[in-house]
Amino acid sequence: MNSIFNKIPIPWSFNRLRKLAGVNPLVVNYHVVSDHFLPHVNNIYNYRDTETFTRDIDFLTSRFRIINLQRLLDHLKTGKKLPDNAAIITIDDGLREVYDVMAPVLKRKFIEPVLFLTKNYVDNKELGYDHRKSLVINRINELNDSRTENNLTTLLQEVQQFSHTVIDSIIGIPYDLRHLVDSIAKMIGVDYPAFLASQAPYLTSSQITGLIGQGFSIGGHSVDHPNFRELNLEDQLWQANESMDFVCERFQVNYRVFAFPYWDAGIPVKFFTDLAADATFGTQGLLSDIIPNHIQRIGFERFKYSARQSIKAHYFRKMLLSKMGKGVITRNKI
């Protein structure tokens, strides 16, 4: 969502705006919370510190009835009524700070969130290709060497991936050229296995089992975190089903839920009809969707606004788009 919606004076009270927007449940999404510099994350997206995250949760619990995944699934399957002010907390990727930082805050508030796991991250088997990008960019900035930049510019130009600057170009490397990030890492001395071994940035199976014991629900978030818009339908379905199969088998859960990495815009109806899932989750704010069990989410991480400001802005956006006849996401059949 564009930050302009956070800057527009909104005349309605929060509760009035919530009712006018007609969104229920509100689904909120996070990735990671930390008070420390995270070199594998800092160039990819913003993240909350513990104090800000705690304020978010305090606000949400003061204005909403926080429900768990099972209650949502019951609603989707049987029509069982939700509280008028229901909300759900979701967390993507499976970074270690979910266990170390986020879970203690959520536990104090008796919140049972949904954790969406990227299969190859679990037990620190593989460093995500966007997380690799972040480490590479930090190393380039640390070297601050014109010769290195010139060599990287040449490499990127040779494969037609140069855009404006070396940093911009690396950020823009697509999933199917992820090997290019690895080539750059070797050129400048970034050691992914050493980082995984020393930092263990992702959750272990044991930690995930502990979180389930605290009331967390879990779902799939792909095998290795591609942008689904870059995949054909067959690969989209494999990524989603494989990640849910992994979660169900490894952690013995009897439901199947999936959250898209990045963005779910442009995903066709056939994906949802062919997918074996109880519910899926997107990232397009508070818009409705023609897929009845596909639920959109909002995030607070992109901009440094409070939870209250962010939610009001999303409610206002939903109202405006609905008045313009754009409040429901449409999709191609195939």
Image (cartoon, rainbow, N blue to C red):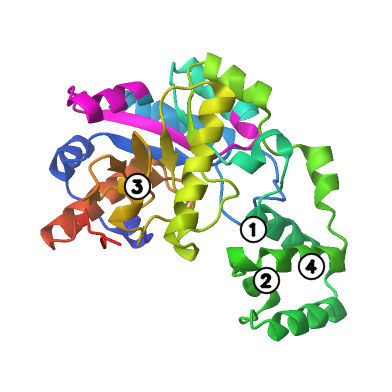
Residue at the spot of label 2: 167
**First in sequence: mark 2 or mark 4?**
2
Q: Position of residue 83 (x, y in %)?
A: 21, 23
Q: Position of residue 323 (x, y in %)?
A: 11, 58
The crowd level at tag 4 (other Cα within 10 Å; few <14, some 14-19, many 20+) is few
Cβ–Cβ under 8 Å for marks 2 and 3? no
| Magenta segment boundaries in residue numbering | 70-98
Residue at the spot of label 1: 43
Residue 324 colored in magenta in the image: no
Asked which quadrant contains residue 169, the reply is bottom right
Residue at the spot of label 4: 183
Rendered position, 166 above or below 84: below
Rendered position, 98 above or below 32: above
Q: Is residue 110 left or right of residue 41?
A: left
Judging from the image, what secondary structure is the residue with disc 1 in?
loop
Give residue 274's mark: 3
